Amino acid sequence: MTNRLEISPTSVIAAACQPAACRQAEVLAGYTLLERLGAGGYGEVWSATGPGGLRKAVKILHGRYDGPHADAELKALECVRELRHPFLLNIERAEVVDGRLIIVTELADRSLDECFNAARRDGERGIAREALLDYLQDAAEALDFMYERHGMAHLDIKPENLFLQGDHLKVGDLGLVKGDRDEAGLGARGRGASGENECEGKPETRRHQYPLSSGDRAHFAL
């Protein structure tokens, strides 16, 4: 029988440095962490099982969240969590645990970046043109829905934040969003938010709504 240990977010990050064979099954906010999927300046993302054995993605953000600041961040995430579209990766839960912000989302199959790298390893130039056009159509529909229906712009569109689920693509990392009243603005502390990408008030239609770096554009070359 596997031992389960309820631990803090800080302990999760420290334990990730240990060999997998030496770690107990770690439980955070009721989710059993299985595998670290990625890490960076923003925090870490883990695959996990939640209530009912459903697989989810659990993001643990770096930085301290407490007091009014935590309340503001949770309110911002609640605005984003209410967005419902078939091509948006849903945020299912957000809470502060021991001063660290925890975000639970759907678990996708893989990112567009991982798909691209797999194709390159197989000797291909990249993702097949027709498949890529279908994926980008899905992303465009989701981003138009955010902007046209809710006045929200995603501030970090790149292959790592576009996720494949079955035959479709979903836009993820929705914490990095800014809207008309700046109710959803975790980009201020998240990764990838740059001054040129931020919108003051409603996003301008005269500017490119979904900015990409030159490196990101290379992934999308047709």
Image (cartoon, helix red, strand yellow):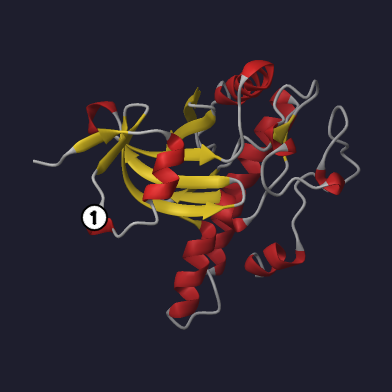
Residue 107 visible in the snapshot: no
- Which part of the image, by quadrant, shows the C terminus? bottom right
Give the SS element for disc 1: helix
Percent coordinates x, y for residue 152 in the rendering:
73, 30
Q: Is residue 188 above or below residue 207?
A: above
Q: Is residue 159 above or below residue 87?
A: below
Most distant residue in the right direction: 206
Query: Quadrant of residue 11 in the image?
Result: top left
* 55, 115: nearer the viewer: 55
Percent coordinates x, y for residue 74 in the rendering:
60, 21
Residue 102 visible in the snapshot: yes
Residue sitting at x 56%, y 20%: 82
Reading the image, the residue beneath label 1 is: 22
Local packing at callout 1 (Cα closer than 10 Å; few below 14, some 14-19, many 20+) is: few
Residue sitting at x 49%, y 47%: 44
Percent coordinates x, y for residue 6 in the rendering:
30, 31
* 96, 114: nearer the viewer: 96
Most distant residue in the bottom direction: 123
| Residue 207 horizontal side relative to residue 186, left or right | right
Query: Quadrant of residue 21 in the image?
Result: bottom left
- Which part of the image, by quadrant, shows the N terminus? top left
Amino acid type, label 1: Cys
Residue sitting at x 56%, y 61%: 132
Instruction: Please state the total of marks drawn on the protein image.
Output: 1
* 102, 6: nearer the viewer: 6
Query: Quadrant of residue 53 in the image?
Result: top left
Percent coordinates x, y for residue 52 in the rendering:
23, 27
